[in-house]
Amino acid sequence: HGAGKNYMVAPLAKAAVAVGADGLIIEVHPCPEKALCDGAQALTLAQYQKLHEELLAIHKLLSEENALLTL
């Protein structure tokens, strides 16, 4: 809901995770162009799967980095 355009979802979500967001709301629809609402900002299932993997990688990297700082 941050930008209302699906091409902005990934960069905004990645930025949010990078600065420590505890949660995200991401619209996902099997066919966004046929969605009754919010289709313009919805990701397809494949787009969401890819983004989810990337977000987990960012979170893992930052978690490991923080763990090293506390040693």
Image (cartoon, grey):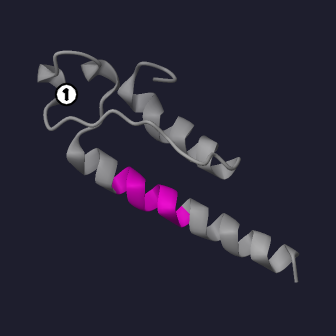
Compared across the picture, whether 45 is left or right of 63 comes to left
Compared across the picture, whether 8 is left or right of 64 comes to left
* Residue 50 spot, x, y in % from top left: 34, 55
Q: Residue at x 30, y 30 (%)?
A: 42
* Residue 22 spot, x, y in % from top left: 60, 48
> SS for tag 1?
helix
Q: Which residues are magenta?
A: 50-57
Eyeballing the image, is 64 above or below 14?
below
Which quarter of the figure is the N terminus placed in?
Answer: top left
Local packing at callout 1 (Cα closer than 10 Å; few below 14, some 14-19, many 20+) is some
In the image, 22 versus 54, the foreground residue is 22
Whether residue 18 is in magenta: the answer is: no
Compared across the picture, whether 71 is left or right of 23 comes to right
Figure disc tally: 1
Which quarter of the figure is the C terminus placed in?
Answer: bottom right
* Residue 48 spot, x, y in % from top left: 32, 47
Eyeballing the image, is 58 above or below 19?
below
Q: Residue at x 27, y 37 (%)?
A: 28
Give, as a three-letter code, the residue at label 1.
Answer: Pro
* Residue 32 spot, x, y in % from top left: 19, 28
Eyeballing the image, is 14 above or below 32?
below
Q: Residue at x 71, y 47 (%)?
A: 19
Eyeballing the image, is 59 above or below 46?
below
Q: What residue is pinned by disc 1?
A: 32
Q: Residue furthest bottom?
A: 71
In terms of secondary structure, what is the magenta stretch mainly?
helix
